[in-house]
Image: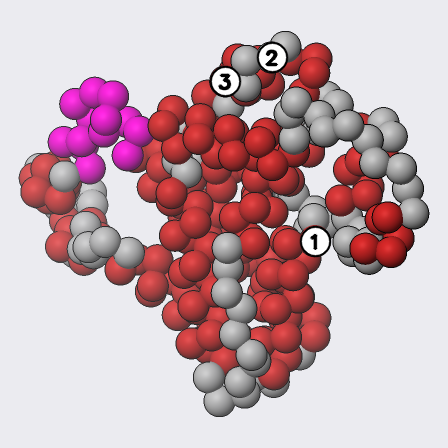
Amino acid sequence: MNPRERRAARHQPPKTEAEAGSRPRRRKAPITVEQVIDTSLGVIATEGYEALTMRRLAGALDTGPASLYAHVVNKADLDELLIGRLCAELVLPEPDPAAWREQIRGVCTQIREQYLKYPGISRAALAMAPTDLETVRVSEGMLAILLAGGVAPQAAAWAIDALLLYVAAYCLEVSIARQRSAQDDAVWVRDRDELLRRFAALPAETFPHTTRHAAELTAGEGHDRFDFTLALMIDGLAHR
């Protein structure tokens, strides 16, 4: 089975034991897809997503880059496997029409927490078609929640895309900010007191709203802005 056939097979439901047993077993390969995923996540957790290349991964697995292509088609295929692994960790609730807002917010929060464990990994989710079974499971679950809440199918479909895009972008920005802060003295640029001083130094006649509302522009702790934006998007769906 070539790499593309392997990828296609991963998008199919698992075979039953009877079906699997009808084929002769092959000798266990020295490297498995699970090892590739585990090692990739390890590299990302310690070095960030940008450090993950096929060459870097091969080195971590103590093999040559060419041998990886027996398990993954290319970097995009690897990205799909990584996001699929993170999606497998998500717990999807049974859709409740009375609690659909809290449920969809909870799923998005779970995704955020998974992404933030691995700096920059949400970049892999951008422009990705949901074909991995675990990513489809999540989109299916989100769709079920929104439909149970009375959201029209087309609005629900686009809302899922918008929510996932926002979560990925938010996590990517957080990861970039953390990386910059760890590498140099750029942390002061994002310090609230420093931002307030810089806004206060602006000419008020040119920037009247920025100087007047500097406190509001720099407000927020932790994931306050994330929670605000999710609520804004979800409440917008409720009022359609």
The quadrant in which the N terminus is found is top right
Give the crowd class for mark 1: few <14, some 14-19, many >=20 residues within 10 Å: some
- Mark 3: amino acid: Ala
Say whether residue 57 is visible.
yes
The question of residue 53 being in magenta is answered with no
Give the crowd class for mark 2: few <14, some 14-19, many >=20 residues within 10 Å: some
Foreground of the two, 41 or 202: 41
* Residue drawn at the location 20% of the way across and 56% of the way down: 220
> Which segment is the magenta one?
178-190
Q: Quadrant of residue 70?
A: top right
Is mark 2 in CB contact (under 8 Å) with mark 1?
A: no
Q: Residue at label 2?
A: 63
* Residue drawn at the location 82% of the way across and 41% of the way down: 8
* Residue drawn at the location 70% of the way across and 48% of the way down: 132
In the rendering, which numbered label is found on residue 122?
none
Foreground of the two, 84 or 151: 84
Q: Nearer the viewer, mark 2 or mark 1?
A: 2
Local secondary structure at mark 1: helix
Figure check: 179 above or below 149: above
Q: Residue at label 1?
A: 133
Q: Nearer the viewer, mark 3 or mark 1?
A: 3
CA distance for labels 2 and 1: 28 Å
- Mark 1: amino acid: Leu
Figure check: 224 above or below 214: below
| Residue 2 drawn at (x, y percent) | 85, 27
CA distance for labels 2 and 3: 8 Å
In the rendering, which numbered label is found on residue 60?
3
Label 3 or label 1, whichever comes before in sequence order: 3
Is the magenta region chiefly helix, strand or loop?
Answer: helix
Is mark 2 in CB contact (under 8 Å) with mark 3?
A: no
